[in-house]
Image (cartoon, coloured by chain):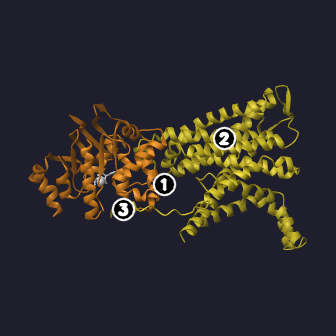
Amino acid sequence: MMEAQTIPKPIIPRFPSLKFILRAVAVLIVAALFFVPNYVEDTYILHMMILIFINVVMGSSWNILGGYTGQYSVGHAAYFGAGAYTTMLLLQYKQVAPWYGVWVGAAAALVVAVIIGSICFRLRGPYFVLASIAVAEIFRVATLNLKDITNGAEGVLITEIPPLVIGGRLITDWASKVPFYYIGLVFALLIIGVTWLVRNSKLGYYFQAIREDQDAAHSLGIGLTFYKNVALAISAIFTSLAGSLYAVYVGFIDPSTVLGLDVSVQIVIICIIGGIGTITGPVVGAVLLVPLSEALRSNMITDLLIKVGIVGEETRMGLFLKEHLSQAHVLIYGILVVVTILYMPAGIVGFVRRMTARKARA
Amino acid sequence: MAILELRHVSKFFGGLAANSDVSFEVPVGTIMGLIGPNGAGKTTLFNCITGYYPPSKGEIVFDGRAMNGLLPDKVCKLGMARTWQKVRPLTNLPVLDNVIVGALCRTRSVRDARRIAQEQLHIVKLEGKAHLLAGALPIGERKKLEVARVLATKPKLLLLDEVMGGLNPAESEEIIQLILDIRKEGITQMVIEHDMKAIMRLSDRIVVLNSGEKLAEGSPDEIVNNPQVIEAYLGAES
Ligand SMILES: Nc1ncnc2c1ncn2[C@@H]1O[C@H](COP(=O)(O)OP(=O)(O)O)[C@@H](O)[C@H]1O
Ligand SMILES: [Mg+2]
């Protein structure tokens, strides 16, 4: 049928696609984020935003290894802690400014990654997961016991951050939250940009091939050990940046807060809830989970329930919630993860995608 | 000249000799058929040749180079690619991306790889399915995808493990034409197949395996007239 081929396709006026609109909205939000400190004075909001940025960095970093490459590390606290400890120890005991320290921290995380990679990548599936937990725990216990270097369980408290002066001009004395806000924002955008670059390059294709089927990937010319280690290296470096920023921002670290298993689990949960193996997944996860965990910790939810009148303050229920809900955040996290895995196995982002795809077809 | 040479290759799984003392050569540009009853050790031999595991004994020489101990990724880079009897699509990736992964074996550029992948999909007539997830394809198309993906790695030697298994006659015929076209490109092939008619039509030479041992080797005519083969294999079939 020659005619059929020569008839030009009718030109259908094209409205901006959903994808285009979402991208435009994302750009606007990012632009707006740069001006937030100019208008928002409330330090609590800035505090939450900083924590969200840090969690975005944590989740997105894990996502490179876990989401794209399919290596479910539950030991990322090791890299978070490597950054945090290196930066803090250098700052507190060697007077090395944190803006140099973070890079030493990243290098330290890289060394840790090489060690962990050489041990864990011999294993697959659940064995890899268990090994990643075990090796991270070794780092925690070592940090706890190497008191001469790490100060053991007492942790490291910084007394002073030197003012940042560039070309004779004082940039910041770190007294407010604003500089941390901008650093967090830049780190978050950086890892999102890196993820985008990775996904659209040879690396991204190879990472995903390894995730989908290691043997098939191997037979198509993909060096498994090499590419897994590359994924881990990228992941570890950015996780360490999150750790360093967290440490300097909070001003205090100890083995359980930066090297504990719950840090590793938090990192994974951000991705599971948001959506593994997508760029936006960890962002969505962090935006939801940080406020939730803060609300749980600070008894905000109980206060709200009492205020709205759902439970009376002096009733048994009210007293019970006041007493225990703040300690139950791990439990609630657990429930959330179970519900997500059961009903939205691809996380919120995957769920929304499926819904919009279904609509588009209908 | 032989592109592939097996010298006394054996593979043991515990006490079981899945391959024992197998030797033969595959001349450049030909199609070598590999047949034998189920469990004869055909897939195991492919696994040894492509580095999936090292042979327990013996030597494998590809393109003048001893392959012993080389891992599958290195083997693929040297120009040997295989398909899997039990197909292994990258299920959550689009069909096109599956082939791009293969093409990236020869280039860093995703754009070049995409172009190569589109050509390969065109060759196996899957271009219309490029954007579906590989996991959504029916078996016939998965087999074609498997072939497109290894072709994209630009192999000198292609090992096809039962690519016609589970296909209907029309689909099988398509694959047969594809294999003949691939030969025209100068790519050497080793083909495992159960369909006797197809294998006789395709092969320049045939090796018969039985219980891990090489039972016979020769042209299709020689093989069909070999009493040992008829006894051990063709006889058992009918
Ligand atoms: N990984 C393995 N471990 C143990 N035995 C195996 C393994 N792979 C294959 N075998 C055995 O080796 C023999 C040959 O199998 P295979 O090469 O798959 O035969 P074919 O492809 O000719 O049907 C069979 O008896 C099979 O059970
Ligand atoms: Mg087989």
Q: Is residue A229 visible?
A: yes
Instruction: Measure the C-alpha gap from mark 1 to mark 3.
Output: 16 Å
In the rendered view of the protein, which quadrant contains the C terminus of chain A? bottom right
Where the N terminus of chain A falls, by quadrant? Answer: bottom left
Q: For mark 3, what is the residue?
A: B139
* Residue type highlighted by circle 1: Leu
Task: Name the residue rendered at 76%, 57% in the picture.
Answer: A293
**Callout 2 amino acid:** Phe
Q: Are marks 3 and 2 in contact (CB under 8 Å)?
A: no
Asked if the beta carbon under badge 3 is closer than 8 A to the nearest atom of ligand 2, the reply is no
Amino acid at circle 3: Ile
Q: Secondary structure at mark 1?
A: loop
**Outermost right residue:** A314
Which residue matches tag 2?
A: A238
In terms of depth relative to the viewer, which is nearer, B38 or B160?
Answer: B160
For residue A274, say whether it is visible. Answer: no
- Report x, y in % for residue A154: 81, 39
- What numbered label is drawn on residue A301? none
Residue A220, position as x, y percentages in the image? 41, 44
The mark nearer the N terminus, 1 or 3, is: 1
Q: Secondary structure at mark 2?
A: helix
Q: Is residue B83 left or right of residue A10?
A: left
Q: Position of residue B24 (x, y in %)?
A: 20, 40
> Judging from the image, what is the letter of the chain drawn in orange?
B
Give the chain letter at badge 1. B
